[in-house]
Image (cartoon, rainbow, N blue to C red):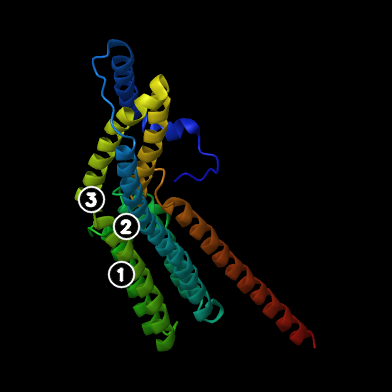
């Protein structure tokens, strides 16, 4: 995704460079024929393209709003994923007690949190139609990676592994039933967020709606030189290009925003969000380990004092 505040002008014009080239040739031919050869002494009232431009402006505005709503909903969903990932890590760290239970609980907690880190990356890669298992070996074991690779939906398989671990934790007494219910609710909300992302991904923006607006826009651009040639002469070339560029850029913006998971510069920054989640979860896990270490050291000191007394 584009994260810079100052977008290069070259990048903006690069999106419509071929369309502007065609418009330049088209308007130049009309201007020469009208001014010199008098072969094409055609002009139309300016009100006609102006009226058509007003209608297209309304349609483009409505289309841009709909596209932005899809993009904003995707960003809102990933904001919820950030919150739920932190909530899951916090619950896992505070519901279980490593000091009393030992290394088994520590491995359980680390396995859940590291798997959640991988789940965020896997979901983003799945939505972008790339390999959902790429890089997962850094977060889960080889056996688990082989197991989830058999699924067509890898993020779903990872959430299923969450559920299996919670069941084992309940059976072993590491968490009680109320804590298991709360953890399961958090995982359910993560599953709901994944389903919302898949709904946006799989719901295609109506192609006929886009096509009709595009044809109307081409008609407006083709009529515009004939409406302004009488008033501006050769100056109609930069004028038509500037007006056409404005409409074309708005159309391009709507096209890019309507698909927020297409691995384009304007899509939702899922990799960056997943990286931020990983940073937070690693800090939570490390801080918890340090607190437990300090608690152990304090307990040993208390024992020594007791023996001295």
Chain-order first, disc 2 or disc 3 = 2
Residue 230, relative to residue 12: is it above or below?
above
Q: Secondary structure at mark 3?
A: helix
Q: Nearer the viewer, residue 267 or 284?
A: 267
Looking at this rendering, what residue extends furthest in the left direction? 208
Question: How far apart are the alpha carbons under marks 3 and 1?
Answer: 40 Å
**Residue depicted at x 34% and y 35%:** 46
Front: mark 3 or 1? 3
Residue ID for mark 1 = 160
Are circles 2 and 3 on residues that touch, CB within 8 Å?
no
Chain-order first, disc 3 or disc 1 = 1
**From the image, which quarter does the C terminus lie in?**
bottom right
Residue ID for mark 3 = 209
Badge 3 crowding class, 10 Å Cα cut-off, few under 14, some 14 to 19, many 20 or more, is few
Q: Nearer the viewer, residue 132 or 199?
A: 199
Residue 155 image offset from top left, x and y in percent: 32, 61
Query: What mark, if any, has residue 145 been given in the picture?
Result: 2
Residue 116 image offset from top left, x and y in percent: 42, 64
Chain-order first, disc 1 or disc 2 = 2
Question: How far apart are the alpha carbons under marks 2 and 3?
Answer: 43 Å
Q: Nearer the viewer, residue 199 or 91?
A: 199
Residue 13, relative to residue 31: is it above or below?
below
Is residue 106 at least partly visible in the picture? no
Question: How far apart are the alpha carbons under marks 1 and 2?
Answer: 13 Å
Left or right, residue 227 beside residue 284: left
**Residue depicted at x 32% and y 65%:** 196
Q: Nearer the viewer, residue 22 or 286?
A: 22
Badge 2 crowding class, 10 Å Cα cut-off, few under 14, some 14 to 19, many 20 or more, is some
Are circles 1 and 2 on residues that touch, CB within 8 Å?
no
Q: Secondary structure at mark 2?
A: helix
Image quarter for residue 115? bottom left
């Amino acid at each position: 995704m584009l994260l810079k505040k100052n977008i290069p002008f070259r990048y903006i014009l690069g999106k419509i460079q071929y369309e502007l080239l065609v418009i330049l040739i088209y308007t130049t031919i009309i201007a020469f024929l009208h001014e010199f050869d008098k072969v094409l002494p055609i002009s139309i009232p300016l009100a006609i393209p102006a009226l058509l431009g007003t209608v297209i402006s309304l349609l483009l505005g409505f289309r841009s709003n709909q596209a932005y709503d899809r993009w904003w909903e995707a960003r809102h969903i990933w904001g919820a994923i950030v919150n739920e990932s932190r909530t899951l890590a916090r619950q896992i760290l505070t519901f279980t007690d490593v000091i009393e239970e030992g290394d088994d609980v520590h491995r359980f907690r680390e396995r859940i949190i590291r798997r959640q880190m991988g789940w965020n990356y896997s979901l983003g890669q799945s939505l972008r139609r790339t390999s959902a298992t790429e890089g997962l070996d850094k977060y889960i074991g080889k056996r688990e990676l082989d197991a989830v690779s058999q699924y067509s939906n890898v993020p779903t398989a990872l959430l299923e592994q969450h559920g299996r671990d919670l069941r084992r934790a309940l059976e072993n007494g590491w968490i009680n039933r109320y804590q298991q219910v709360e953890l399961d609710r958090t995982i359910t909300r993560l599953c709901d967020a994944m389903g919302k992302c898949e709904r946006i991904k799989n719901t295609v923006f109506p192609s006929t709606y886009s096509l009709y607006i595009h044809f109307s826009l081409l008609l407006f651009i083709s009529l515009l030189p004939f409406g302004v040639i009488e008033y501006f002469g050769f100056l109609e070339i930069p004028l038509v290009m500037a007006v056409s560029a404005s409409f074309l850029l708005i159309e391009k913006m709507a096209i890019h925003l309507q698909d927020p998971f297409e691995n384009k510069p304007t899509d939702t920054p899922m990799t960056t969000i997943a990286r931020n989640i990983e940073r937070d979860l690693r800090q939570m896990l490390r801080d918890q380990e340090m607190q437990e270490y300090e608690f152990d050291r304090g307990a040993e000191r208390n024992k020594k004092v007791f023996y001295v007394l």
